Image (cartoon, grey):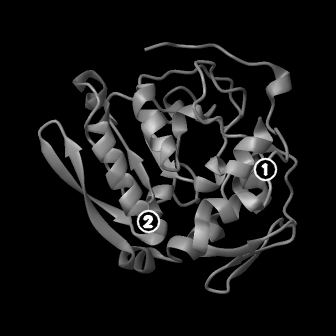
Amino acid sequence: MRPFTLFTASSLLFSLSWGNPQCYIEGYGDLIVSADETTLLLKDGTRFPYRNDSSKSTWEDKINNADLATQLSQHYDEGGNETPPAYLFDPGRLRYQPFFQALYGKDQKTVEKNLVTILWPTLKGSLKLPVSKIGGVDKKLFAIGQEIAKLPKSDRIWAEGATTYAYRVIKDTDRLSMHSFGIAVDLAPAKTQYWKDESPSETAHIGYRNTMPRSIVRIFEKHGFIWGGRWYHYDTMHFEYRPELLAPSCVAKAK
């Protein structure tokens, strides 16, 4: 385990507007018909404003009142490096909840209609994991498991104890966890690291810790999943399907 101490004031919050609406079209394929700086249109006819009128002046505003533009306001560093995330740099953690409810299910009953079971390989056999079938998330997570199964045992052990679907809110908030949509997976919960074990405050200055092998992280990212270990508010067990943050247009614009 490697502890880190960070932070400069210049890293605060908002690497603004690196993304663009095209990221949603590229990320979600035929689930989205169109997206521009004013409106995003889903295949089922649902429309969302690209920006809402809620205040975005503080970190709490951003995380509690995100819109589609805010979701892309921080560059997710695919591949990444060993540098700890900057202060309040949480690419992908700023989420517009109605968007995910429209894609995967507006409530628990609807979400569960879209769940299927995949087999997740472990060192002692296979686990049955419930995962959303929307957008082929189930197929992508199955492929991830197959690739991880080819890694050395010293890395594979970090993919044990996998959990996926659980309809619940994020601890100490009223925001739905991405596990509620069947598009997130936690690995090795007993051995990984979570920022709230250091401080409950969203704006506290905290260190960084991680033991999740980068070999596993890279496999997830290749299939459209982001990793909570790239967040200042680190959650190193956590992976979630967020292809808009790994879309070609967004990656190119961020470089």
**Which one is earlier in the sequence, the residue at label 2 or at label 1?**
1
Secondary structure, mark 1, is loop
**Residue 220 visible, this orientation:** yes
Residue 66 appears in view: no
Q: Residue at x 41, y 28 (%)?
A: 215
Quarter of the figure with residue 142: bottom left
Q: Where's residue 178, x and y in %?
A: 50, 57
The three-letter amino acid code for the residue at tag 1 is: Gly
Q: Indicate the position of residue 231 as horizontal and vertical percent values.
A: 61, 35
Q: In percent of the image, x 42 and y 37: which residue is there? A: 237
In the rendered structure, the answer to whether residue 7 lies left or right of residue 199 reads right
Residue drawn at (46%, 34%) of the image: 217
**Residue that carries the numbered disc 1 in the rendered image:** 19
Position of 167 relative to 216 (above/below): below
Which residue is pictured at 74% across the width and 74% down the height? Answer: 34
* Depicted 42 relative to depicted 228: above or below: below
Q: Which residue is mark 2?
A: 136
> In this rendering, would 133 be left or right of 37?
left
Observer-nearest residue: 108 or 45?
Answer: 45
Who is closer to the viewer here, 38 or 70?
38
Please identify the quadrant where the N terminus is shown: top left
